[in-house]
Image (cartoon, rainbow, N blue to C red):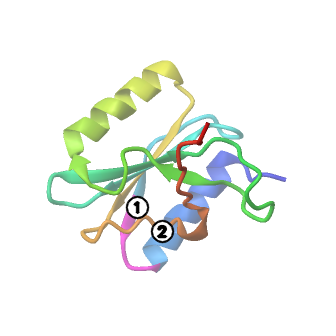
Amino acid sequence: MRLHSQIWVAAFIRQVQAQGSQAMLTRRGETMAGAIYIKVNMLDGNALLYSPAPALDLNETIDRVWMSEFGDAPRPEPEIDLFLKGQVQFDADIFIVEVEDKEGRHFLGEQLVSLEPKQI
């Protein structure tokens, strides 16, 4: 059974803080099933963005999986914010969690997947 979004977000924020970084909820979404976006603010004007990965049958023990929205290279923070603004306009029920970490750590561990383009 999947954790409600609000519970997952609260646990994630505590996990980040327990590892010495800061995380805060910047947008509250739909309590039970709102999509969650993780913005990693590198505190130098750049950021990374992690979004929900498409539902894949990767590992039944993992509650949620994430993908890097723009690859591994940090992007200017205003670009990330503009993308998130568009996502909110598309779906007003999303959560946005902002992690402040100079090293760009996402704290998603094995929940982060790399999606390769499918070969046809």
Q: Amino acid at mark 1?
A: Ala
Circle 2 crowding by C-alpha within 10 Å: few under 14, some 14–19, many from 20 = some
**Magenta stretch secondary structure, dominant:** loop
Residue of label 1: 23
Q: Position of residue 11 (x, y in %)?
A: 60, 64
Q: Position of residue 30 (x, y in %)?
A: 63, 34
Q: Which mark is residue 107?
A: 2
Res 105 → quadrant: bottom left
Q: Is residue 67 left or right of residue 34?
A: left
Circle 1 crowding by C-alpha within 10 Å: few under 14, some 14–19, many from 20 = many
Q: Which element carries disc 2, helix, strand or loop?
A: loop
Q: Residue furthest front?
A: 120
Q: Which element carries disc 1, helix, strand or loop?
A: strand
Q: Position of residue 38 (x, y in %)?
A: 45, 51
Against 74, is 89 above or below?
Answer: above
Q: Point out the frontmost of discs 1 and 2.
A: 2
Against 56, is 22 above or below?
Answer: below
Q: Position of residue 23 (x, y in %)?
A: 40, 61
Question: What stretch of residues is rendered in magenta?
Answer: 19-23
Residue 109 in magenta? no
Residue at the spot 28% in from the left edge and 71% down from the top edge: 103
> 68 or 34, which lies in front?
68
